[in-house]
Image: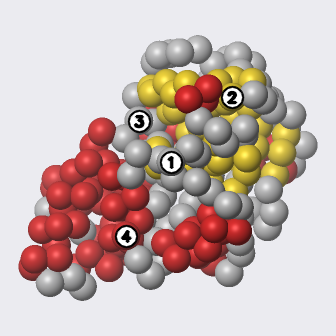
């Protein structure tokens, strides 16, 4: 469930919001920031596939040494669909790109999606800005601890904490300097103490958010 990365091995470290198949947009944003694949690192908050124009190319990013990602609920829906041979939930949530592929393309996509089984739910990385914890929707606990047992479903889907913040309720999380989440589209990056919600709805007409951690 957990993966640890040492930020000192990289020149710059960036975290990116839900890509959702917007491969070329991501490449354009990286170019604008003079991203160097030989020296820099990009970490995704998950949901690299579905809804956008190029889920296949986004899946291929996982083969790059400069790209890491946590598991999103869309990757999980894809894995569940393939395992159970039931594509209904995935299709209504943007997975129709897969059923539109040729047989050969589907085989390639399945191989790439199989790699999603190895995606962690949580990435911990120490950068110059301190200890960062990255998860898709939430870290469903009051305090972070390495390898703390968690409800994986809530890590991928839970919006309760963010919804609470927006009506003046809820609490932060101790145990790390920064927590980075996607999943719930917001008009602009939303920060509450050390919690940062960065899914700014790129695939819904918003923007793709990249934040530099180091």
Q: Which residue is mark 1?
A: 38
Mark 1 secondary-structure assignment: loop
Q: Marks 2 and 3: which is nearer the front? A: 2
Q: Which residue is mark 4?
A: 57
Mark 2 and mark 1: Cα distance apart in space: 18 Å
Q: Position of residue 116 (x, y in %)?
A: 31, 48
Q: Earlier in the sequence, mark 4 or mark 1?
A: 1
Mark 2 secondary-structure assignment: strand
Q: Position of residue 66 (x, y in %)?
A: 47, 47
Q: Position of residue 149 (x, y in %)?
A: 46, 18
Compared with residue 52, is residue 15 higher up or lower down, i.e. above or below? Answer: above
Q: Earlier in the sequence, mark 1 or mark 3?
A: 1
Q: Earlier in the sequence, mark 2 or mark 1?
A: 1
Numbered mark located on residue 127 in the image: 2
117 sits left or right of 29 in the view = left
Mark 2 and mark 4: Cα distance apart in space: 28 Å
73 sits left or right of 29 in the view = left
The residue under the point 32% across, 79% down is: 97
Numbered mark located on residue 120 in the image: 3
Q: Earlier in the sequence, mark 2 or mark 4?
A: 4
Mark 2 and mark 3: Cα distance apart in space: 19 Å
Q: Residue 171 is drawn in which quadrant?
A: top right
Q: Marks 4 and 1: which is nearer the front? A: 1
- Tell me whether circle 4 and circle 1 mark residues in contact (CB < 8 Å): no
Q: Residues within 10 Å of mark 3 (few under 14, many from 20)?
A: some
């Amino acid at each position: 469930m957990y993966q640890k990365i040492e930020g000192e091995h990289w020149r710059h470290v960036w975290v990116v919001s839900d890509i959702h198949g917007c491969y070329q947009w991501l490449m354009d944003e990286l170019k604008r920031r003079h991203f160097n694949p030989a020296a820099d690192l990009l970490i995704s908050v998950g949901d690299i596939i579905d809804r956008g124009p190029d889920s296949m190319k986004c899946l291929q990013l996982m083969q790059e040494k400069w790209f890491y990602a946590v598991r999103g609920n869309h990757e999980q829906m894809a894995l569940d669909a393939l395992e159970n041979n039931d594509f209904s939930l995935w299709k209504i949530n943007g997975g129709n790109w897969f059923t539109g592929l040729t047989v050969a393309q589907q085989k390639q996509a399945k191989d790439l999606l199989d790699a999603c089984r190895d995606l962690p739910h949580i990435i911990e990385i120490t950068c110059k800005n301190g200890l960062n914890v990255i998860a898709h929707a939430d870290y469903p606990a009051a305090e972070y601890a390495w390898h703390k047992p968690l409800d994986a479903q809530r890590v991928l889907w839970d919006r309760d904490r963010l919804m609470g913040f927006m009506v003046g309720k809820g609490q932060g999380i101790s145990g790390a300097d920064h927590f980075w989440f996607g999943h719930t589209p917001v008009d602009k990056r939303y920060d509450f103490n050390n919690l940062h919600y960065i899914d700014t709805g790129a695939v819904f007409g918003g923007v793709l958010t990249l934040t530099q951690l180091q």
